Amino acid sequence: MQLHERQQFDFLLLTAAERYVERLTQRNEGAANALQRLKADPNGDGVWLDEFVDAIFQDFLLENAAGASFILQALGKRKIKAVPEGKVEEVLVAMAKQVFGELLRSKTEEVLEQSVMYGGE
């Protein structure tokens, strides 16, 4: 991955994490509640990680083979849990959403833990 592509990916991840943390904190009345609910069920009521990832992919025009390849190239060392069956483009997008969602969850937990630890609720 070229340096400018890495910079674009890092910007995407940072933007997504900031937006997601803000929404989670608001919906769940604070960082502590948001963190607890995210850890308990990332797709539960008020958390909706997969829906957020879908929205990010739409907002950043990543729901295509090229967009998915961009994400997969950046996260090439991560493991895929299960490869869905379907058309190549659909499979690429599904895999990209899966690994991006896992990374976003991890980064969000990290930010929320820091917020709780330092009293930034």
Image (spheres, grey):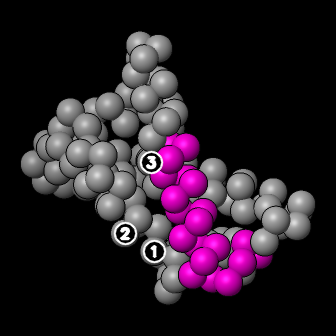
Whether 9 is drawn above or below 47: the answer is above
Q: Position of residue 115 (x, y in %)?
A: 79, 62
Tell me, for residue 34, which label it has, or none. none
In the figure, is residue 41 to the left or right of 7?
A: right
Q: Secondary structure at mark 1?
A: loop
User: In the image, which disc is placed on residue 48?
Assistant: 1
* Marker count (numbered): 3
Q: Is residue 26 visible?
A: yes
Earlier-in-chain disc, 3 versus 1: 1
Dot 3 corresponds to which residue?
100
- Residue 25 screen position, x and y as percent: 64, 73
Q: Amino acid under label 3? A: Phe
Give the residue pinned by disc 2: 51
Q: Residue at x 57, y 81 (%)?
A: 27
x and y percent of residue 52 in the render? 41, 65
Q: Which residues are magenta?
A: 13-32
Magenta span has 27?
yes
